[in-house]
Image (spheres, grey):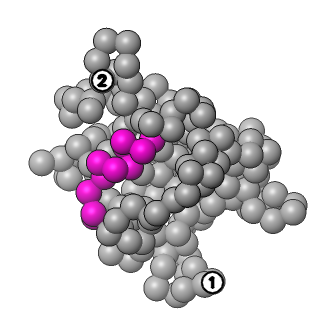
Amino acid sequence: MASSSESPSSFHIRPIQAADLGAVKTFLGELSPGTLYFRFGRLSMPMLTEQEWNDLCSPDASRIAHLVATAPSEPGRYAIVGMGRLVCEGDDGQSAEFSIVVADHLQHQGLGTKLIHALVGEARRRALPSMYGDVLPSNQAMIRFCKGLGFMSHRCPNDERIHRMVLSLKSKQSEKSVADTAESLKHLAAQYVS
């Protein structure tokens, strides 16, 4: 496990690899029930088949960008301390859903911001007009986090209780919002650091 005293700059964000399977299982297995609930909508890790685990670590790169944040755990070894996904939907690939999850002991310290910035960069590279993430209403920290980055809150078409956080990638305002909010997010994160 990486130390909670690490700064976000000491983490490395990169595409997931098939060789990450064991580290991914360890990372997801160490998440608290609360973090699992906010990420998967349930208090425990969903049961995955070996094929689903393999697909998670070897995604179809034409549709899915799956990133991991790693930190040194011991000499020559690393731990996964965060994950972010961007999944292009539909035949036209004009919409994409994002999700992120960060190790409990590293939340509210800037790593989620780094993951979101990396996903936004990937969405722009793919020339997507927007990206969205569905957030449970009880996950107020994530709703504030997204709004601080320029995401707009809409009702989810499948469930009106869910907040659909949407970031337009076409406008200059969205570029400014994402690029210029680091200081405000540091202030926001400071409110949650215990």
Q: Say whether residue 146 is left or right of residue 3.
A: right
**In the rendered image, is residue 72 in sight?**
yes
Chain part drawn in magenta: 24-34
Residue sticking out furthest to the front: 50
* Nearer to us: label 1 or label 2: 2
Dominant SS type (magenta): helix
- Dividing the picture into quadrants, the one containing residue 103 is top left
Residue 36 picture quarter: bottom left
Q: Which mark is residue 73?
A: 2
| Neighbourhood count class around disc 1 (C-alpha, 10 Å): few under 14, some 14–19, many 20 upward | few
Q: Which residue is mark 1?
A: 157
Residue 127 % position (x, y): 79, 46
Name the one closer to the observer, 110 or 67: 67
Residue 4, given in percent of the width and then of the height, sits at 21, 34
Element at badge 1?
Answer: loop
Callout 1 amino acid: Pro
Camera-nearest residue between 14 and 43: 43
Q: Please state if 166 lies on the left or on the right of 27 as rendered.
A: right
